[in-house]
Image (cartoon, helix red, strand yellow):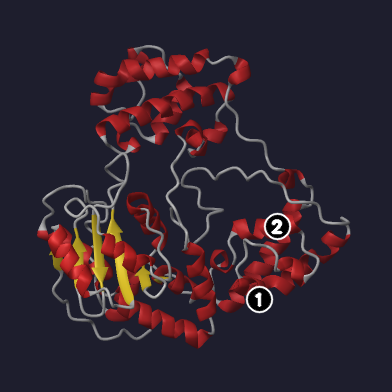
Amino acid sequence: MTASKKPDAPRTLFLDSPEAADQFLSSIETTRVVAIDTEGASFHRYVDRIYLLQLSTDARHAILDPLKVSSPSRLGSLLESREVEVVFHDADYDLRLLHQDYGWQVNNIFDTRIAAQLLGIKAFGLAALLDSYFGVKLDKKHQRADWSMRPLPSDMLDYAAQDTMHLLGLREQLRDALERKGRWHWAREEFARLEGTQWDSEDIGSSFLRLKGARDLSRRELALLRELAIWRDGVAKGIDRSTFRVVTNDVLLDLARRSPRTMDDLRGVKGIGRGILEHRGEEMLEAMARGRAVPDAELPRFPKSPRWDRDPLFDERVARLKRVRDESASQLELDPGVLCARDRLEAVARAKPRHIDEVQEIQELSGWQIEVLGPSFVHALKDLSNGEGPNEPAATAAPPAPAENDEADASPYRDG
């Protein structure tokens, strides 16, 4: 594509007092479109929160410091208004943080990542899009910076400002392209699905089952893993550090397999920091001892597979739906997971639709997906559905959560 004219870099205001924030937010309260981004510190802190809020309108740009401005209520009113379009790039995690920290639920969303994906753009990261459309080069050196630190150096503030400075121009380019392709209504439906996104508190009691590699452990080893995960969580919370900075997931799994009983045994496990070993080693041994003491009848296990996984034709239905999806994706020049993610295919396989009106009742599908794929889905399942008699009610159990970092079944729109 031909790059548009590179925008000039305007001045960005730094709002580090309630008075400055109120003055800026008052000046933009009549705007009808605003770009927003957040910076957290999940790579560094135990509980992530918003440490910077970047805002852009057509004419003004600002960075708000939430550590100095704790209750920017004017901003909440702006973001929750259905009269204001709120532009993000990869909105999901930003929406969760905004809900966690302020209780806000943003309406009327435009997500430039989703828009780019629905256009079939393969390089849909913000840096790639800004380079492609405007020739703007983003410096990535602060991607994993600790945004909780204060004072923030000027180069970090400059980096943060770039995240929204060009979003409104990008939104115009992407919307025009979607309209030309007849896909604007696709995007509107996917944006609407983001409304109501909330922060989900993780249950440490079962989160250990989602660690990649946990399924390879015995039930006794799972008991050790659970106790180690609970121990690690407590340490991380106490020092306000990300859990992986205490002990990595791979080390937890290795400990669960080896089940060391002495400090000498523990020293033989690679990947444990010297400080943790010296100051927390005995606690780790105690955690594993608790895991070894769990009675056999109380050993943890993975949830049983839901009924549809035991349906002998379920996998065949998914395979047929996947073939239809992949063929259509190729014709539309879309990533197959963007056209219809695996979890949505499985929802169709569970429903076993025999007519298009039954496809229309599947809540996991967007209207545009029914429009593009619905008739083909019905045709693909025709002989299987007819051979099974009346549809059975869908199982109420949820499928097991994917292992951590396993992207095979993840929605392409959600990074969470």
Instruction: Please tell me whether residue 322 is drawn above or below residue 85 in the rendered image.
Output: above
> Which residue sits at x=77%, y=51%?
393
Judging by the rendered image, the residue that carries numbered circle 2 is: 318
Q: Amino acid at mark 2?
A: Val
Q: Is residue 141 left or right of residue 290?
A: left
Between 415 and 325, the one lying in front of the other is: 415
1 or 2: mark nearer the eye: 1
Label placed on residue 227: none
Q: Position of residue 16 (x, y in %)?
A: 13, 58
User: Is residue 15 visible in this depiction of the protein?
Assistant: no
Q: Quadrant of residue 11?
A: bottom left
Q: Position of residue 182 (x, y in %)?
A: 54, 84
Q: Badge 1: few (under 14), some or many (20 or more) residues near its Cα, within 10 Å?
A: few
> Which residue sits at x=47%, y=71%?
117
Q: Is residue 249 left or right of residue 235?
A: right
How far is mark 1 from mark 2, CA to CA? Answer: 19 Å
Q: Secondary structure at mark 1?
A: helix
Instruction: Please tell me whether residue 379 is drawn above or below residue 291 in the rendered image.
Output: below
Between 362 and 219, the one lying in front of the other is: 362
Instruction: Please tell me whether residue 288 is drawn above or below residue 192 in the rendered image.
Output: above
Counting residues from the start of the chain, the first of labels 1 and 2 encountered is 2
Instruction: Please tell me whether residue 396 is drawn above or below residue 164 in the rendered image.
Output: above
Q: Badge 2: few (under 14), some or many (20 or more) residues near its Cα, within 10 Å?
A: many
Q: Is residue 302 left or right of residue 165?
A: right
Q: Position of residue 353 (x, y in %)?
A: 77, 63
Label placed on residue 371: 1
Q: Quadrant of residue 262?
A: top left
> Which residue sits at x=17%, y=76%?
9
Q: Position of residue 165 (x, y in %)?
A: 24, 72
> Which residue sits at x=68%, y=65%?
323
Q: Amino acid at mark 1?
A: Glu
